[in-house]
Image: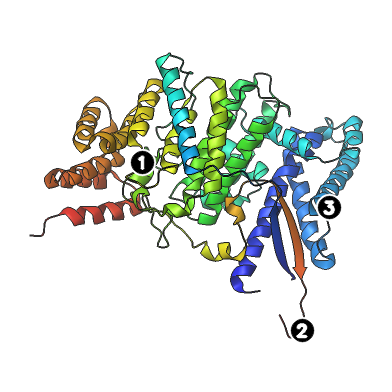
Amino acid sequence: MNESTKKYSRELAEHFFRTEYGKIVPVITRYVGVNNVETAEDIIQETLLKAVDNWQQKGIPENPEAWLYTTAKNIALNILKRKKHQKKYQLAETSNIVALEHLQFSNEIILDEQLKMMFTCCHPSISENSQIALILKILCGFSISEIANAFFTTTETINKRLVRGRRQLRENKVSFEIPKRIDEHVVIVQKTIYLLFNEGYSPTQKNELIRFDFCLEAIRLAKILVVNKSIKEKTDCYALLALMQFNASRFKARMNTDNSIINMERQDRSKWNKDLINSGTQYLNQAMRGNQISKYLILATISANHCIAKSFSDTNWLAILLLYDNLLELEDSPTVRLNRAVALSKAKGNKEAIVELENLERNSDIGEHPMFHAVLAEFFKEENEISKTIIHFKKAIALTQNKRDLKLLEKKLMAVVPIS
Amino acid sequence: MKEFMLFIRSEENPKANLSPEQLQQHIEKVGSFIKRLVDEGRMKSAQPLEMEGRILSYKNGKIVDGPYNETKEVISGYYHLLAKDLEEAIEITKGDPRFEEGIWRVEIRPIKKVEGIN
């Protein structure tokens, strides 16, 4: 096997184990209790280690998943039987042990328990940071150091978030079930999933492989929401899923080999993933059944308009502009207006967009954001108003805190400074 | 340490691919649907989807980042990305599993170490 095949195989193996971890932990948690979710995590860790050991010696079993499930179940049963007298396992009474003995893993059970785990991890009593950490660790099976790496922080920090999250679950006596006011809780889960997606999609992450995995994980979790029967109002579930798939479809084309991003204008659209676009479209259609709109739906449709355009210039900017107008009805914020301005510039010309942004600067604090000035600078540049271009690139530079962005902005500035 | 070779198969049937015209049609349909609801005043109350910097709240002062493609991607390379080349991985299997959604069945086989060959 050559080097890259080896590496790819290893990645696939890790991916497989990670996915199974995320499936089995919720199921076992149901039997050991939410208070002991760490125990469930340990059980599955042990299971996976046993698998690696056993499979290396004896080869891969015919049904690797079943092997894992059986092993995890047996380890869990041993612990429950041994420790049922301990206070913290009091919840795991005999009935639980019997139930666990009879447990047959099935797709449906796995999906159900994962759904409960999502609600648990996203319980409102838990801070947002901890919610994401818990989801990444428990449902997505990432290791603490992988998570720390992705967030540019230390393993201690991530560990603290996990510990705090688990403690909050205990203190608030969160139970492992579908919440009664499910619609409220679904909103939080959706938000967390979307944060996770954006974390993976964000261009500031160090490790590109993990990053796209985050996106795929977010999509996978959103699908769990979509297929389950407990959630009645699914419009946003479909819309969120569509949005993420549309965005993810362009992922590969955004990346340059030299650590830079390729802007949409220059992306090779043949690299856009058609399956994701198709799938997104189908979910988008389903989202219409609810006769309701939300930000997710509008954003998804905007993203879709980009995805179906043959080229940058063929993009239906007017449609996108109208969608932003619709979005403004939901939320009139500087951020929305800023992004709308880009569509406006393409649909109706830079001059109108410039006016809009200058108004925006007067009426909000958007002038403190580097992005605002970068966008405005580009508009002025296209209008050949060089002095104003320079002013705004300089402001963007002064406001930016990110080294990479800084370098890029300085490059852009140099490109317009007249040679004297 | 033995080597493993993995085969990943998708268990789902491939979705029928929509043609560009069909895609166009569908997206336009959604656009008008949205417009109609807005005109009828049927906006749902806002989701707690905070756009103003909460998305990257654990990073310093990154405010405007978010789901908007316009500022993220339209503006010439404003954000940088650390990327590795996935091309080699893709060439190895047909249909890169990273880009497929769906249910996986993973077959993992150990590679026999044979004297003189590997």
> Closer to the N terminus: mark 3 or mark 1?
3
Residue in the foreground of this view, choosing between A186 and A63: A63
Residue A108: mark: none
Q: In terms of image quadrants, where is residue B34?
A: top left
- On the same chain, marks 2 and 3? The answer is no
Looking at the image, residue B88 sits to the left or right of residue A220; the answer is left
- Using the image, name the chain to which the residue with label 1 belongs: A
Name the residue beneath numbered marker 3. A67
- Using the image, name the chain to which the residue with label 3 belongs: A
The C terminus of chain A lies in quadrant: bottom left
- Using the image, name the chain to which the residue with label 2 belongs: B
The residue under the point 42% across, 35% down is A302
Picture coordinates of residue A50 (x, y %)?
Answer: 80, 57
The residue under the point 50% across, 55% down is A208
Name the residue beneath numbered marker 2. B115
Looking at the image, residue A153 sits to the left or right of residue A352; the answer is right
Q: CA distance from mark 2 to mark 1?
A: 58 Å
Q: CA distance from mark 3 to mark 1?
A: 50 Å
The N terminus of chain A lies in quadrant: bottom right
Q: Tell me whether circle 2 and circle 3 mark residues in contact (CB < 8 Å).
A: no
Q: Nearer the viewer, mark 3 or mark 1?
A: 1
Badge 1 amino acid: Thr
Name the residue beneath numbered marker 1. A315
Q: Tell me whether circle 3 and circle 1 mark residues in contact (CB < 8 Å).
A: no
Badge 2 amino acid: Glu
Crowd rating for badge 1 (residues with CA inside 10 Å; few <14, some 14–19, many 20+): some
**A108 up-or-down from B9: above or below:** above
SS for dot 3: helix
SS for dot 1: loop
